[in-house]
Amino acid sequence: MQNLNDVIAIAEHEWRSTGIAERDRMALANDLRAELEAAAAEGVTPTQLLGDSDIRAFARNVATEAGTRRLPYDIKRLLLTSLAGATPGLAFGWAYLWWLPNAPYIGAVIAFVGALLTVKIRMSDVAATGRTVWAMTLLLPVAGILVTPVTMSFAWATGYSTALPIVFLEVAIVAGALSAATILARRWALAPALGSHRLVASKGH
């Protein structure tokens, strides 16, 4: 049986995961606590008050009815915008691969700078874009450094094959690492606004 603190913790977790700003989450939590405490004073448990309602669905409905503010992650838009900005550099690295020994590295730098500038300019209407670009500046190089030996090991294991399926897999490995770093950067950028503390549900029943 869920107690009062369990219900509030689950609701707050749901509000945070859907991008509701911290100030609004606090107001919703205070209202919910007051309602649950008033019900408890009358001998009504949270389970009896909510009935068969799913707590997470209940929390989403409460937030919608209250007209709360949301800070969208916009992950799909962020990834597509980053890709658009990185494409010229990637194209350069690929086009001059056989004629310019340093082409891949030059292309990588162009792609990196292009992705950051494109996100900063094209997503200026989105909350925390500046912090997102800053976080990407830190995390993307780390992801690139970490994924390089993995990709090289895979290439070595396949005999440095240039078969299209192998090349596509190598590209997918790199793209997956960089996409993960970009998503992490966005979540990191929004953490201050969404509240960085973790709520732990009470274990008492």
Image (cartoon, rainbow, N blue to C red):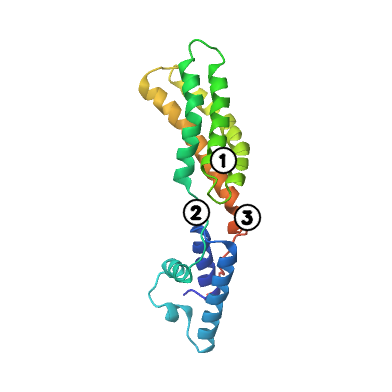
Name the residue tied to disc 1. Answer: 120
Please state which of residues 183 and 153 is positioned toward the viewer in this rendering: 183
**Mark 3 or 2, nearer chain start:** 2
Horizontal and vertical percent for residue 176?
Answer: 47, 36
In the image, which is nearer the foreground, mark 3 or mark 2? 2
The one of 61 and 45 positioned closer to us in this rendering? 61
| SS state under label 1 | helix
Comparing labels 3 and 1, the label whose residue is closer to the camera: 1
At label 1, the amino acid type is Lys
> Of residues 27 and 88, which is closer to you in this image?
88
Which residue does the numbered mark 3 point to in the structure image?
192
Q: How far from the left and from the top, in percent, is residue 60?
A: 44, 66
Determine the residue positioned at 41% across, 23% down: 167
Q: Is residue 205 above or below residue 96?
A: below
- The residue that disc 2 covers is 72
- The answer for how far apart the CA atoms under marks 1 and 2 are is 16 Å
Q: Is residue 27 visible?
A: yes
Whether tag 3 and tag 1 are in contact, CB under 8 A, the answer is no
